[in-house]
Image (cartoon, rainbow, N blue to C red):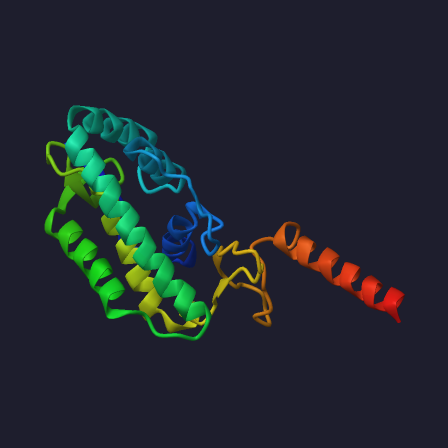
Amino acid sequence: MGTTISFLPSRPEQIEVCLDFANTVRWHASEHPEERLHSYPDLVIWARDQGLVKPKEAQALIEKAEQHPRESARSLQQALILRESIYRIFSEKAHGKPPAQADLDQINASVSEGLARTQVFLTADGVQWGWKMDDPVINQLLAPIALAAASLLTTHELLARVGQCADARGCGWLFLDRSKNHSRHWCDINDCGNRAKQKRHYERAQRKNRG
């Protein structure tokens, strides 16, 4: 039996999963980032919510992690290393800088390892790519994320739309700017964008009062 993971991203919403993964740290660009993935089950639940695995497959991976605690801990560590490489690559891109070769190497390693463990399986939806459930290595989740990052890096019309929240406090949120004139600056106009607006109003009022 195999766990089927659609890891060959082609649509923007599939490719964007790599940015969603990078955003599993709050305040990523600040001096005090807040981790959201504290355990391998946290990673699996995130992947389930992103549609990378089905609920039954997610539960099977969590149960497998309980049987292989060392492997699951190692897989989580590998996932976090990959995430930081993805974050650095697209954070640099958002500011017009090239990626570091070491970070590209990390993505390539995850892609290669994932592809080496894949097979095709007959499912109710037809033949799909996937991994064997009896494979003792449980880092299957890294391949679709790494492939999404590779797809984004090589899809130039989407790569040009990668942006990062302009919040000066270090929000660090990465996004694809889908606005028509490429004018998005914030993770959310009602969050960091609203704070920036209020700050501008306050500063203008202060200058007016001093004048």
Name the foreground residue: 123 vs 188. Answer: 188
Res 117 seen here:
yes
Q: Position of residue 195 (x, y in %)?
A: 68, 53
In the rendered image, the quadrant that contains the C terminus is bottom right
Q: Nearer the viewer, residue 66 or 208?
A: 208
Image-based side of 138 in relation to 205, left or right: left
189 shown above or below 75: below
Q: Locate residue 170 relative to residue 70 in the image: left or right.
A: right
Task: Residue 196: name its quadrant.
Answer: bottom right
Number of dots carrying numbers: 0
Quadrant of residue 70 within the rendered picture: top left
Residue 124 figure quarter: top left
Viewer-nearest residue: 195 or 118 = 195
Q: Position of residue 24 (x, y in %)?
A: 41, 45
Residue 14 position in % (x across, y down): 38, 53
**Residue drawn at point x = 34 percent, y = 40 percent:** 47
Above or below for 38 versus 107 = above
In percent of the image, x 63 and y 50: which residue is there?
191
At x 46%, y 48%, the residue is: 32
Quadrant of the frame with the N terminus: top left
In the image shown, does 180 or 173 lie closer to the viewer?
A: 173
- Residue 2 at least partly seen: no
Location of residue 48 with respect to 104 vertically, above or below: above
- Vertically, is 113 above or below 66? below
Residue located 10% across and 34% down the image: 136
